[in-house]
Amino acid sequence: MASKYLSSEELPAGTRIACRVEYHGGAFNGWQSQTHENVTTIQDVLEDALSQVADCPVRVFCAGRTDTGVHAHCQIIHFDAPASRSPKSWVFGGNGSLPRDVRMHWAVPVAADFHARFCAQARRYRYLIEDTSIPSAILSGAVAWHRRELNADAMHAAAQALPGERDFSAFRAASCQATSPMRNVQQVSVSRRENLVALDIQANAFLHHMVRNIAGALIMVGDGRRPVAWIEELLVARDRKLSADTAPASGLY
C-alpha cells in the first residue's frame, strides 16, 4: 500500500478526505441513516466513529448506497475534516470505534470539489452464488445459495446482452427513484470457481435492485428454466413483471 494512504502527516481542518470502506452488511439496515429508532446503518457507525476521532460531528458521503444485508469491498466515501488529523489517525482511530464488520482501509486528501458519488467514473458489483445441495455454514450470510447446479457458461452468454447504453426497466425495482431507466453497462461476466458462481458487472451507475434483479434472471438461465436469449427478451420488453424474483442481498458486494 502506498504510504500516502496511511500518512502520519497531519492535515489541516477543512481538508476533504476520501476513504476506502469495507463492510459485511448482514447486521445493518443498509448504508443510509434512517429516522427509525433501533435501526443501525453503515453511515451511522462511520459517522459516530469519525466524530470520536474529530471530537466533533462528522458527516460522510458515499459513492453508492447499499441496501439492507448488502456488503462492500471498496466503498468510497468522503468527508470534510472538522479537525486537524493525519490519514493514519482517521483510519486507525476510526477502526478503533467501529464494529468488527466495518473497516476503513485508507484515507487520502482530495480536491475540495471531489465528491464520492458524483465524481465516480464507474461502479462495480460482484454477486456470489453457492450452488450446492446443502448450504455452507461458514458462508452463511456472505453468499446467496441455490440448491441446483448452475451452468455458468450459459449465464455468461446470456449476460452479454447487457453491455451498452440500455433501458433497464426490466431490472428496476418498483421503488426506484431514478429519473431514467437508462444505464450504461460497460462490462459483465459470469465465472465459476469450485462451488461459487460469480457475476461481475460494471456500469456508470445502477438502478435500485438492478444487480440483484439481473442475478435473479441469470440464475433462471443457469438452472435451465429459461434460455440464453431470455435476458435480451426481457430488455426489449422493458417489463419488470416478466422477469425473475430479486436475488437475496447476501450475495451482493
Image (spheres, rainbow, N blue to C red):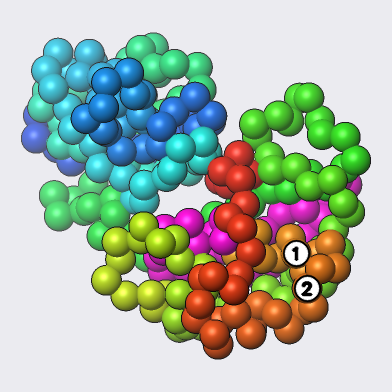
Residue pictured at 38% horizontal, 75% vertical: 181
Which is more toward the observer, 237 or 253?
Answer: 237
Residue pictured at 56% horizontal, 43% vertical: 249
Residue 23: x and y in percent read 49, 32
- Label 2 and label 1: CA atoms lie apart by 6 Å
Badge 1 marks a residue whose secondary structure is: helix
Badge 2 marks a residue whose secondary structure is: loop
The answer to which quarter of the image holds residue 89 is top left
* Residue 190 seen by the camera: no
Residue identifier under label 1: 220
Judge left or right: residue 17 versus residue 83. Answer: right
Query: Identity of the amino acid at label 1?
Result: Met
Q: Is residue 198 magenta?
A: yes
Q: Is residue 103 above or below residue 128?
A: above
Q: Which residues are magenta?
A: 187-213
Q: Is residue 245 magenta?
A: no
Residue identifier under label 2: 226
Residue pictured at 41% horizontal, 69% vertical: 204
The answer to which quarter of the image holds residue 223 is bottom right
| Label 2 environment density (alpha carbons within 10 Å; few <14, some 14–19, many ≥20) | some
Residue 21: assigned label: none
Q: Is residue 80 above or below residue 210?
A: above
Q: Residue furthest front?
A: 241
Sooner in the amino-acid sequence: mark 2 or mark 1 = 1
Residue pictured at 54% horizontal, 70% vertical: 241
Judge left or right: residue 61 versus residue 82. Answer: right
